[in-house]
Image: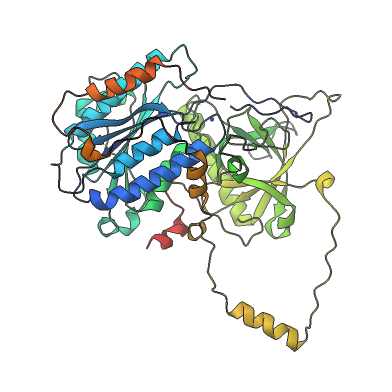
């Protein structure tokens, strides 16, 4: 699934935490030894470029702070040493162009050694980068590695476990092994689903490394959603939301009347705010003020939010016209600072709440509790939210209007009868429309990616040479030599300056356990 500087607001009620970004650096290893690389190359390159255009277009702090890209063919090669993503789109785009130009299928023998060497080289490169930037603006202390391959993923996991036992893995947060398969090779129940990795060896468990195995279909949408997971908040240092419920009398007969039960939760964005992308060419995109009393945000990470549940609402009694703002998904927290028993109890309580709300067809009305008082004579502003259940183990939270925000509106009664000469054309027009059972956003494109690429692109001083003019680079060489040579000038130079169901009828998908919501899978068939 996280800090940002914004213009001051006189209505500010609580201050955002000034913690540095906890987003990990990303090391992407692409195995191009697959026989199907020719068909995978174009979709992989486009999906990666789309996701990185979003990462570059969003305002600071960057959700994807550092990126490095290796290819294996069969020797590892560093196409992009660790580079700050923000303000470097031209360099990243040149790297993706080079990825597109790699030789087609059948050129290289398969094998996992090149991938393991790329992982080892990337870890060493990150260690060097971190050492040289320790006194600078970089605050990234961890790296996540994503390996894209068409080889059997479990065999690669065994190779990684065997070869990495003697490597310093302090900075490594996680390894993802993504097996890219064609639809014909995917079982229906396995498509876009995470596949649990085999039990790690005892040494790997002691080192605390998590190897995650997934399968994904080789199409643009699936790969794009995989890369978009990099834009989520990946900090687990603390929970983001406390959901406060009345304790009731069950098991608390002697508890005071005002005793509250606290569910510890995390927030996750469902959508990117288009307002953040409106001025990406010059970095003037307007970001919502995370320190405003009217704003609950999952990104950037701010002070702990508290929602005090006041009432239950019948789902059919909530008018959608009084709901506003972007929705956020509420999930039970995965904060590592909580002990295991507390995490387990909290998760079971959260699931029970979801189940009970769905069964009763209720929503919850909650008040946002400010963390501190403001300068205006200590007057507190209390925004309100509705919490909406779904058929998954998540809740949806949306802001709901209060009396002060509501404008007068007239709603004339609907006439029961209409003249035939008026009703006929309307009925004919409606009958000509295609009817879909559910709205699928994957059917619509707004040309946002094209806009971002054109507005972010600034010609780089050194354009890549055509491959036929470059010296042959597929000869055997010492591992890590190219990566060290590429990262040396970068390390010496100073880094760049980082400046649903709203009523009961709507449906909402969940991304839990899959790279795409379930209702979108039909689009891929």
Residue 212 position in % (x across, y down): 33, 37
Rendered image quadrant of residue 481? top left
Here the colouring is rainbow
Residue 522 position in % (x across, y down): 42, 62
- Residue at the (53%, 38%) spot, across then down: 57
Residue that lies at the very extreme toward the top in this rendered image:
135
Residue that lies at the very extreme toward the bottom in this rendered image:
420
Q: Depth check: 225 or 394 in front?
A: 225
Q: Is residue 152 visible?
A: yes
Q: If the image is split into quadrants, where does the C terminus sit?
A: bottom left
Residue 407 position in % (x across, y down): 84, 52
Q: Answer left or right for 196 relative to 86.
A: left
Give the vertical position of 303 relative to 414 (above or below).
Answer: above
Give the vertical position of 316 relative to 457 (above or below).
Answer: below
Give the vertical position of 332 relative to 435 (above or below).
Answer: above
Give the vertical position of 365 relative to 127 (above or below).
Answer: below
Q: Depth check: 68 or 518 in front?
A: 68
Q: Is residue 318 visible?
A: no
- Residue at the (47%, 41%) spot, across then down: 53
Rendered image quadrant of residue 226? top left
Residue 275 position in % (x across, y down): 63, 43
Q: Answer left or right for 211 relative to 306.
A: left
């Amino acid at each position: 699934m996280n800090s940002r500087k914004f213009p001051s607001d006189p209505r500010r009620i609580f201050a955002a935490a000034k913690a540095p970004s906890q987003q990990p650096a990303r090391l992407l290893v692409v195995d191009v030894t697959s026989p199907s690389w020719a068909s995978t190359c174009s979709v992989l390159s486009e999906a990666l470029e789309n996701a990185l255009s979003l990462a570059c277009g969003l305002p600071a702090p960057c959700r994807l702070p550092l990126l490095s890209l290796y290819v294996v063919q069969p020797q590892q090669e560093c196409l992009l040493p660790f580079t700050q993503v923000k303000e470097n789109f031209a360099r990243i785009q040149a790297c993706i162009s080079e990825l597109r130009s790699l030789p087609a299928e059948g050129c290289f023998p398969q094998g996992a050694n090149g991938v393991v060497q790329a992982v080892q080289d990337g870890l060493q490169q990150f260690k060097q980068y971190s050492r040289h930037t320790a006194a600078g603006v970089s605050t990234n202390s961890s790296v996540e590695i994503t390996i894209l391959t068409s080889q059997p993923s479990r065999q690669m996991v065994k190779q990684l476990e065997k070869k990495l036992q003697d490597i310093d893995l302090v900075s490594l947060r996680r390894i993802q092994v993504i097996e890219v398969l064609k639809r014909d090779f995917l079982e229906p129940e396995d498509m876009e689903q995470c596949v649990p990795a085999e039990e790690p060896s005892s040494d790997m468990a002691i080192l605390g490394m998590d190897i995650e195995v997934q399968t994904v279909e080789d199409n643009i949408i699936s790969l794009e959603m995989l890369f978009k997971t990099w834009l989520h908040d990946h900090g687990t240092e603390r929970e983001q939301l406390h959901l406060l419920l009345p304790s009731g009398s069950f098991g608390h007969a002697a508890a005071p009347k005002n005793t509250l039960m606290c569910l510890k939760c995390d927030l996750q964005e469902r959508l990117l705010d288009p307002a953040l992308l409106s001025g990406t060419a010059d970095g003037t995109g307007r970001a919502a003020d995370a320190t405003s009393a009217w704003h609950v945000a999952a990104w950037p990470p701010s002070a702990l939010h508290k929602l005090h549940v006041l009432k239950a609402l019948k789902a059919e009694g909530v008018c959608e016209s009084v709901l506003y703002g972007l929705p956020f998904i509420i999930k039970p927290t995965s904060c590592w600072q909580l002990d295991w028993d507390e995490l387990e109890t909290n998760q079971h309580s959260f699931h029970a709440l979801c189940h009970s709300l769905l069964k009763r067809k209720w929503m919850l009305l909650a008040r946002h509790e400010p963390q501190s008082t403001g300068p205006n004579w200590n007057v507190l502003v209390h925004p309100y939210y509705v919490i909406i259940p779904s058929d998954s183990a998540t809740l949806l939270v949306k802001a709901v209007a209060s009396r002060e925000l509501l404008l007068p509106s007239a709603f004339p009664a609907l006439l029961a009868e209409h003249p035939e000469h008026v009703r006929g054309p309307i009925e004919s027009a409606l009958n000509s429309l295609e009817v879909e059972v559910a709205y699928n956003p994957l059917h619509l494109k707004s040309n946002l990616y094209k806009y971002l690429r054109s507005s972010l692109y600034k010609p780089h001083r050194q354009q890549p040479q055509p491959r036929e003019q470059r010296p042959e680079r597929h000869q055997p060489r010492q591992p890590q030599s190219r990566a060290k040579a590429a990262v040396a000038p970068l390390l010496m130079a100073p880094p760049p300056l980082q400046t649903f169901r709203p009523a009961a009828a709507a449906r909402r998908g969940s991304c839990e356990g899959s790279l795409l919501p379930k209702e979108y899978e039909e689009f891929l068939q």
